[in-house]
Structure formats: C-alpha cells, structure tokens
Amino acid sequence: MDFFEMERVLEELVRTFAAPSATTWFKVTGDKKPTLGEYRMKVAEFMNLFESALSSGFQGDPNSNDLLNFIKKSVRDHTTLALSGKNKEVEKRYKYYVEYG
C-alpha cells in the first residue's frame, strides 16, 4: 500500500512538530541552556507523543495494520537519527536556542 502522504508527514515531523515543541518546552520551564543530549531526548519524547496520537487514530480497522507498522518504524528511524545527532534540523534548532533563545 502507498503511504506517500503519511511519509511526507513523518519526514517533516522533527522540523514542524518535535523540535519546535522541545524548544517551547525548554522556554516554558525556564531552561535556557539544556545540554544537547537533553534537547535531543525532549525531541524524541515529542516524536513519541505524536506517534502515539497518530497511531491511536488509525486503530480498530484490520486494514490499518500496515500503516501502523509503517508509522512505528518511521518514527523509530527518525528518532534514532535525532538522538544520534544525524538530524540537521535538531542540531540547528538546539544551537539557535542556546545561543539566541
């Protein structure tokens, strides 16, 4: 099955949701200088929250199993990249936040 639209959503997840949410979380908590590791972990937490919410919207239909597996794998892969420092968007947003936030 073709999940082109969902693939686009998940590819943009870090840029449009997880990293901005992490930055906002640190602003709200008053932490102006989180470590890079703390920032990456917060991004991963928001990615997992999004995955959970998205997956719950597609449960209950036996035809959604392939999509649910696709979502879980994609989020896991993108989370691994973010935590390992291989997502340029996370690194860029972290640097901007601690230098100018």
Image (cartoon, rainbow, N blue to C red):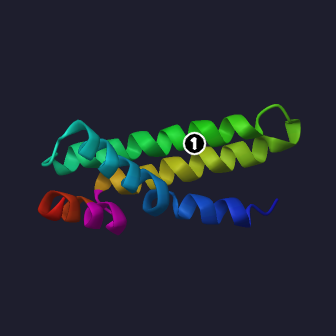
Which segment did they paint magenta? Answer: 85-93
Above or below residue 92? Residue 43 is: above
Q: Position of residue 74 (x, y in %)?
A: 57, 53
Q: Position of residue 20 (x, y in %)?
A: 38, 55
User: Can you name the residue that lies furthest to the top here?
Assistant: 60
- Horizontally, residue 56 falls left or right of residue 25, namely right
Using the image as rendered, state which of residue 45 and residue 72 is in the foreground.
Answer: 45
Task: Tell me if residue 2 can be seen.
Answer: yes
Query: Of the residues shown, which amino acid type is indicated by label 1?
Result: Glu
Residue at x 69%, y 34% (from the top left corner): 56
Question: Which element is circle 1 on?
Answer: helix
Dividing the picture into quadrants, the one containing residue 50 is top right
Using the image as rendered, state which of residue 5 and residue 16 is in the foreground.
Answer: 16
Q: Position of residue 4 (x, y in %)?
A: 72, 66
Residue at x 67%, y 50% (from the top left corner): 70
Task: Tell me if residue 87 can be seen.
Answer: no
Above or below residue 89? Residue 52 is: above
- The quadrant of the picture occupied by the N terminus is bottom right
Residue at x 19%, y 58% (from the top left corner): 101
Above or below residue 41? Residue 10 is: below
Check disc 1 and report the residue beneath it. Answer: 51
